[in-house]
Image (cartoon, rainbow, N blue to C red):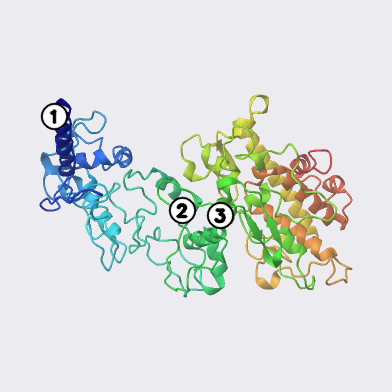
Amino acid sequence: MTNRFFRNHVLIIALILAMGFVYGCGSSSKEGGTHVTVSGPDLAGVDVCLNCHPNQKLDWEVSGHANLNAVPALSIIGNIGESPCRTCHDPQGDGLKVAGILGGNFDPRPVNGCETCHGNGGNHFGLGPIDKYRAAASANGSSQFNTCTACHQLPGASGTAVTTFHVDGPRIITDTHIGTTGNWPGGSGANTKDITGYALKPLDEQACAICHNPHKADATINRQWAASRHGDKTAAGAWAHYNWSRGDRASCQRCHTTSGIIAYTNSQKNGTTYTPPLAQNDSWIPEMLQCNGCHSNNKGALRNPGQITETYADNAVQQYPDISNSNLCLDCHVGRESGGSVSAKAGSWNSMSFVNSHYLTAGGTLFARTGYGFAGRSYANVSFFQHDKIGLTADRTGTQGPCIACHMAFNVNGEKHTFLPLSVERKDPAEPNKITKVLAIRSALCQVCHEGAYEITVTEFEEQKTLLHEAMEAFDAQLQQRGYFWAGANPYFFRSAGNTTSGNAVRNWLSPGDADLTGNTTGKNNMGAAFNFNLIEHDPGAFVHNRYYVKRLIYDSIDWLDDNLLNNSVAATLDSALHAGKTYQAGAKAYILSSGGRP
């Protein structure tokens, strides 16, 4: 009798508790349970929502939407409690419900709770029905876009705000999210002006969540990205120099548009054929490398294409090592043509267009893959070189691979999305990527290996940068001696200085007296030397990425150019009349001949 009485009471209590849970969350159904009808999709309240969603609570409670820094007196009284302020600052009256649920902060204050964005939760429990976003989709915007822009000002067709409640602050997005057309003067074939905004796509169901975690509502990373080269809005940058949707620019989309980067990375990961995703459009909106180009969600998950095998022009193939998540960086930072492309070139060397290495080829430099190698010379990384092992097997450097480890993971200022291991100065408008001065070390990774007696300083970085520039001046003088004048404009090498017209471009690469138009003779090596100069010139961090490889490329190129022989004559050449007394001479010798001969 006692046991039966006890069991019956336990069952009754359990049933009451179960019903309490159902009604406490305002649910009309509980998955796997009996349907219970309640009246209408009423507001549940932020305090109820957060009880069942702890992960979202962790993000939300530190966000601007939770408004921890608000003045309590403005929570329910004064202007915040009035219309129109309350429309955005406390639309569901959640300010009264936050007491005691956020780590001991008991002050009521205006907040944007769960139902502000997701709609009323009265019919929701677990997997029950609730709208993903409060606002409905329209012809001008997805439901997510319309929900977010209900408070974060919606840009009109002209790019100006439709309404203005504030003159500054995070509420206004029209200064950065306009995303009008690229303003292509003269049609799709001409260069664009600066990008007008971040290519926001209002009809995309993830229009805002592509770059923002709405629960955390923290734009710190976004601001870092906007200050980086990945967020460069100028026409001089990578994203708006051309209309990349144009038919003859389709192959460029894989690195110069977010759409192309996503499609190319996915094709590599899945082993499928890559197809450029953008059709030609004279009103195409430029796309910087936005968050979803590298991340598959707004929680930071990275796309990883797997080990990279790059097929350069003329079917020159290079396989790169598997470098963990840094594989993603190699997709666009190993160049489009390599020294192997020069070696594989067929045709008449007295009428040959220059092979352009393309730009920012740090991965190719790091792994000693992209330079033109002269026959009989070794370019393998030296045994004590460790930069290619960072983030892989090098001790205390993490597991993300060298690119992420150096440029992001060890950033001492917490600004990893600026992608800058060093603070640098760039003052040459003709060469916007060229580093004119090293100002500070931003990555703590350097001191992991360069510690104690081997500690590296800003002064040493600046010295290495300067020595490389001086070595390149000697290299440039040697090229000019051969009649090859480099300029910062495609196709880069011209027959005389100051004339960068296409008619003045170098096409005859044969040395005087060489009549072998198609053989592997002077033409190929002369262009190869020029290729190496252009490659290094367009990798501004080459003195850090792999100085040993860079020194070898410079040494061998000068060794060839001075007398068309590979005879280790560089030391004598740097002391010859061509270089004697020049401001760069001592630095060039110190850099190129650092081992007393070939590096």
- How packed mark 2 is, by other alpha carbons closer than 10 Å (few <14, some 14-19, many 20 or more), is many
Q: Residue at x 18, y 33 (%)?
A: 99
Q: Nearer the viewer, residue 377 or 263?
A: 263
Where residue 163 sits in the image (x, y, percent)?
22, 58
Q: Is residue 408 visible?
A: yes
- Please name which of the two marks, 3 or 1, marks the residue nearer to the observer: 1
Could you tell me the amino acid type at mark 1?
A: Phe
| Pointer 3 or 2: first along the chain | 2
* The quadrant where residue 340 appears: bottom right
For badge 2, the amino acid type reads Gly
Q: Amino acid at mark 3?
A: Pro
Q: Residue at x 33, y 60 (%)?
A: 205
Give 205 or 248, whichever is nearer the viewer: 205
| Residue plotted at (42% across, 68% down) | 183
Question: Which mark sits nearer the N-terminus, 3 or 1?
Answer: 1
Residue corresponding to mark 1 = 5
Q: Residues within 10 Å of mark 3 (few under 14, many from 20)?
A: many
**Residue with the mark numbered 3:** 305
Q: Is residue 333 left or right of residue 222?
A: right
Relative placement, left or right, of 430 versus 498 is left
Secondary structure found at label 2: helix
Mark 2 — residue? 231
* Circle 1: element type: helix
Question: In percent of the image, x 57 and y 59: which residue is there?
Answer: 268
For the C terminus, the quadrant is top right
Q: Is residue 126 found left or right of 400 in the rendered image?
A: left
Q: Position of residue 289 (x, y in %)?
A: 48, 56
